[in-house]
Each structure stands twice: as C-alpha cells, then as structure tokens.
Image (cartoon, rainbow, N blue to C red):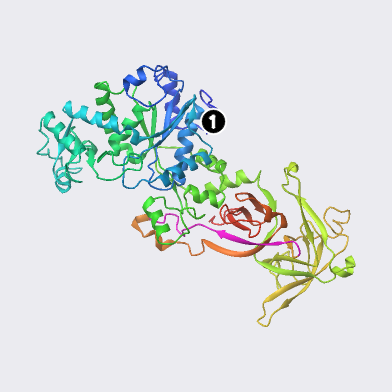
C-alpha cells in the first residue's frame, strides 16, 4: 500500500500544536537536512554509505503485537502518519516485538489491516518501511556487549526481590549491587552464558551502569536484558535472552533514522534513559548523529470506554461482549464493525489535537465527527424499528382494488442527486412506528390519533380513525382513511395541511431485518475511576436486538454500507452477518447525542 503523497512544509489548513511547532523549527534550522538513509535500517556505517535522506522527517508507529488496537492507537496512527505526510516525511510501520510470550501473528495481521483501513501505508520513495524490532536482535546484542566492554553495563545476579529492595524509592537512594564492580571481562563472559542458555529464567539480568542515587528511579541501573526461554513468533528459538523495551526502543529508532519519536506521557520519565542509550552508542560509533529525539503527548482518555488491554480481554473472555470486534468495543475492529469510518476517526483525531496535559474527551466528540462525515455521503432509507400495522380502510374504494400498489420514490440523498432515487410501494397496509399512534396524545403531539391527519412521508395524507386491540388491550393495528389526491410530488400535495409526517415501510415489499441497537458499553463516564471494578457499571441496555422492516432496496446492500435511517440515525449493514437473505444492520449512532445532559 502506498503512503499518501507528501506535502513538504507547513500545512496551513491543519490546526497547530506543539509537535508541529517542534517539527517546523527543526526543518527551519536544518537539524536533519544532512541525515543519510541507506534505504533499510542499519548502523552508522550502513547509513554513511547511503544518500541524503529524501524524507524530511521520519516518524514511526510502533505497536506491540499482543492485542487488538483501540481508539487510542487510532489517534497515534493518525498523528504519526499524518505528521509525516504533512511535512514531506515518511512514517515507519514497526512492530515492537521484543517480548516473546504475548505476541502472535494474529495480532500482527490485525494491526496491519487496521492501519491500512485508516487510510495509511508504509511504502515511500521506492521502499517498504514495514519493520520488526526482532530483526534488530543481533545489533541489540552487539550494543549490549559494547556497553559491557565500555564498563557501562554489568550482569546482576541478585534475586528480583533484592534488586527491588536495593533500588530505593523517591526519598531513599538505591544501593549498589554486590555484582556492580565486576570487571568487563567477567560481565562479558557471564552475559555470553546467558545468551547460550546456561542459566534459567530470572537467574540474572544485564543492567546499565548509570547512577543508583539518581533522583530519577528509572536511571538507577535499569535492566536492559533478561533471560526468557520462550519461542518468539518471528525468531523462533534463536534467542533465550531478550532486550527490555526501554533499551530496545531507542535503538530501533536510531537504526531506522527516526527524527521525531512520539510517545505518550507515561514514557516521559524514561526519556533520560532513551537519551543515555543513544548517546553512549553514538560515542562508540555504533549509531550516527543526528540522534532521534523523543517527545511526549497526552494519551487519549475517552469517556464511557476502557482501553486497558487487560480489561478489554476480560470483557471478551468473560463473555460480556461478543468478541474483539463487538461493535460496543473501542477496538478498531469493533469501531469498524459498528460502522465508524476511517474519515471520521481521522477527523476526530485532528479535532482533539495533541497536548502535554492529560484531559478527558467526551465520547460525543467522536460521534459528532462521525455524523459530520456521514451526513454528506450516507444514503437515506426508511426503516420501522418497532412496527405496528397501519390499515388504510378505504384503499380499495380509492384505487378500485384492495391489491393495488402505488409506486413512491424519494432521493437516495437530498443533497446528492447523482445518487438517484429509491423506489418503494404503498399498499393497503404499511408498517409504522408504534410511537406514531396514541389514543390520548399529549399536547403538541402531531402524529396519528383518532381524528388527526398526518402525512405518510413521500406518500399520501391519511386521517386516523381508531385502532384494533387484542384482549389485553394492546394495539394490534392502527386504522386510517387515505385522503385522495394528496400524494407527495403531485399538484394536490398541499391541498391538505398537516403538521405531522411519519415514516413507514410497505407491508407488501418491506423486508424483515435484524437490527442491533447498540449504545455505550458503560453507564459511567469513567468506568474504572478510583480503582472501581469497571464491570459493575456495564450498561445492561448496551445491545438490543429487534426485528424491523426496511425499504426493499436495503436487502441488496453490501456489508459495510452505511445508511441514514430517516429519523432514527445512522446504520450499517453488518460486515460479518448481513446477507440479502438475512439482512442485519447495526446502529452506529443517533442523529443527535442522546446522552447530552
């Protein structure tokens, strides 16, 4: 898949933010103008032999393939790929797959699909920039040996409990490990024993030698390699030692010649170690200047969802939802099945912007972006979600036959005549919404009640005469008389003035469909606030399934096709279950925010 065309320089149409400001200052100063890129990741010598980098900046999207991406990742995808696009750069698609225990090919495939669905790609300047951190294991090991030889790393054989106790806390400096004074030769021999599988998991780790009294606890000799006898999804059993993420990440950025490494705020305290790793390796000539720089932004906190992978897995594994792609889930596969569009997610990401301060974004902001996107392109249709029969008792008298069917039509989209018209037929019986009839209506009710007139949209004016009921007093059918010569689009359409217009579906050509009415998964804006068990605030009404009637054309809708069901909101033909023989539609969102206070 090809990346969007690059547009060098400042994009005047994009809202400014601190990251754009940083990039623009770097471009103006020529910070990365002389950077070389050999076309593939590599060390200093590899890139020195390459040409000047045609990309003005390089960013990366680096998920760990241990789960399905969620809406927060969508923001990061749009940010990293979008900034590269806007400033004549390239964004790398990189899998941070340095942990062999939780990573699976299933997640790799789903992540690639999600990025492409959102409208982005990783091919640019004749190269594919799809990378795996695990392909850099050889260099990472080489870098670790260099640090050992330079007296900057040592093998520590304390137990995890001893290491934790000796690390200190925010008020107490740490204590040096008894193994910290080993010679580089001793450490190198021990590290190679780790590599060769001579020690069990947890027996020892390789630590950077920095400062056990540092006020930043992350700089108190952090672990950079650990033993894990586990099969890796990419490298198999080639390794039994694996780098820690905080060691691997800056190396990955350097090998790929990343200029702006964008992370969420929880990595801010790790930035000094990020810089330490790069500076030490540059001093040894392993990587080249200019070095990548890390910048942090606030992660997406969206109301009425949880984004913790552990908590999302609980929802799936305990059966609270119907899988990772359940339309109530904040996963990208869930949002896609719900009917959200790539354009809506991009618009949402652009509108919320980026900042250094944590804040909560109301879920309605996402739905507003969705409505703004769908309003101009979703075809219209009529559907009846809570049906009751409307019987036109004088139909045979007016048309001379009880079986007569009157052709009606409506634009597929009121503002897009090129989409044509939709056709349906009106007969002696139609389906209407149950709420469109009341025997004793309140003041201001303009739909059907005995003696009142209303228009069947795109059809005729009818006058309600009463209803049929069952033995329990429930309304089984609404009765009305059709008023001749009032059909929409004819000269007599305005001869009878009415205040109420109701939607309907013909009983003859209407199609029964399963409609899944989805709502927010939680009843509280911050489901896990204060350590609360988020499952206690699950919304019991987050999914309702009804048998509805829809216009005949909707049975032929392809999966993933979105519609505005007039008066009800936006719906999508389910991408897994919908078929012409058995139509299934998911509610995406209403025409307005039903949760507004």
Residue at mark 1: 4
Disc 1 residue crowd, few under 14, some 14–19, many 20+, Cα 10 Å: some
Looking at this view, name the residue that lies furthest to the bottom: 471
Visible residue check, residue 289: no
Q: Is residue 342 left or right of residue 75?
A: right
Residue at left offset 60%, top offset 60%:
515
Q: Nearer the viewer, residue 530 or 342?
A: 342
Q: Magenta stretch containing residue 200, yes or no?
A: no
Residue 44 visible:
yes
Residue 303's spot in the image, x, y percent?
Answer: 46, 51
* Secondary element at tag 1: loop
Most foreground residue, 152 or 529: 152
Q: Is residue 73 above or below residue 50?
A: below
465 left or right, relative to 350? right
The residue range painted magenta reads 508-528
Predominant SS along the magenta part: loop
């Amino acid at each position: 898949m090809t990346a969007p065309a690059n547009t060098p320089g400042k994009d005047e149409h994009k809202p400014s933010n601190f990251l754009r400001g940083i990039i623009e200052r770097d471009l103006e100063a020529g910070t990365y103008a002389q950077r070389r890129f050999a076309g593939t990741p590599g060390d200093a010598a590899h890139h020195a032999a390459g040409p000047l980098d045609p990309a003005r900046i390089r960013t990366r999207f680096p998920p760990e393939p241990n789960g399905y991406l969620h809406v927060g990742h969508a923001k990061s995808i749009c940010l990293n790929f979008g900034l590269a696009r806007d400033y004549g750069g390239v964004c790398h698609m990189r899998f941070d797959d340095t942990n062999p225990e939780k990573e699976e090919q299933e997640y790799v495939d789903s992540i690639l699909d999600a990025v492409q669905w959102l409208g982005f790609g990783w091919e640019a300047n004749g190269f594919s920039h799809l990378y795996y951190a695990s392909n850099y294991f050889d260099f990472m090991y080489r870098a670790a040996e260099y640090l050992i030889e330079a007296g900057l790393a040592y093998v520590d054989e304390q137990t995890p409990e001893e290491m934790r106790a000796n690390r200190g806390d925010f008020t107490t400096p740490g204590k040096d490990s008894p193994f910290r004074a080993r010679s580089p030769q001793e450490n190198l021999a021990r590290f190679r024993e780790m590599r060769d599988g001579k020690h069990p998991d947890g027996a020892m780790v390789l630590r950077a030698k920095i400062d056990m009294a540092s006020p930043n606890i992350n700089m108190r000799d952090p672990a950079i390699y650990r033993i894990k006898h586990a099969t890796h999804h990419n490298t198999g059993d080639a390794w039994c030692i694996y780098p820690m993420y905080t060691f691997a990440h800056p190396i990955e950025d350097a090998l790929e010649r990343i200029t702006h490494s964008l992370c969420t705020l929880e990595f801010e305290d790790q930035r000094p170690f990020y810089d330490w790793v790069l500076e030490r390796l540059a001093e040894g000539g392993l990587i080249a200047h200019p070095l990548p720089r890390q910048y942090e932004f606030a992660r997406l906190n969206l109301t009425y969802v949880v984004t913790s992978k552990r908590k999302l897995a609980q929802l799936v594994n305990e059966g609270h939802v119907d899988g990772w792609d359940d339309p109530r889930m904040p996963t990208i596969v869930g949002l896609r099945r719900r009917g959200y569009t790539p354009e809506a997610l991009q618009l949402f990401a652009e509108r919320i912007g980026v900042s250094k301060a944590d804040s909560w974004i109301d879920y309605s902001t996402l739905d507003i972006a969705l409505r703004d996107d769908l309003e101009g392109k979703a075809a219209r249709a009529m559907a009846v979600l809570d049906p009751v029969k409307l019987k036109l008792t004088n139909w045979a008298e007016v048309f001379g036959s009880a079986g007569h069917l009157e052709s009606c039509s409506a634009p597929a989209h009121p503002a897009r005549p090129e989409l044509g018209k939709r056709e349906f037929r009106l007969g002696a019986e139609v389906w209407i919404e149950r709420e469109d009839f009341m025997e004793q209506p309140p003041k201001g009710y303009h739909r059907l009640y005995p003696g009142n007139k209303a228009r069947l949209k795109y059809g005729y004016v009818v006058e309600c005469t009463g209803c049929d009921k069952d033995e329990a007093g429930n309304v089984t059918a609404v009765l009305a008389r059709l008023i001749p010569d009032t059909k929409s689009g004819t000269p007599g359409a305005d001869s009878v003035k009415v205040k109420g217009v109701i939607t309907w579906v013909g009983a003859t050509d209407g199609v029964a469909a399963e409609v899944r009415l989805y709502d927010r998964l939680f009843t509280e804006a911050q489901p896990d606030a204060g350590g609360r068990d988020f499952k206690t605030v699950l919304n019991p009404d987050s999914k309702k399934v009804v048998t509805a009637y829809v216009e005949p054309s909707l049975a032929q809708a392809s999966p993933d096709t979105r519609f505005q069901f007039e008066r009800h909101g936006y719906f999508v033909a389910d991408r897994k279950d919908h078929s012409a023989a058995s139509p299934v539609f998911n509610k995406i969102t209403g025409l307005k925010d039903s949760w507004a206070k």
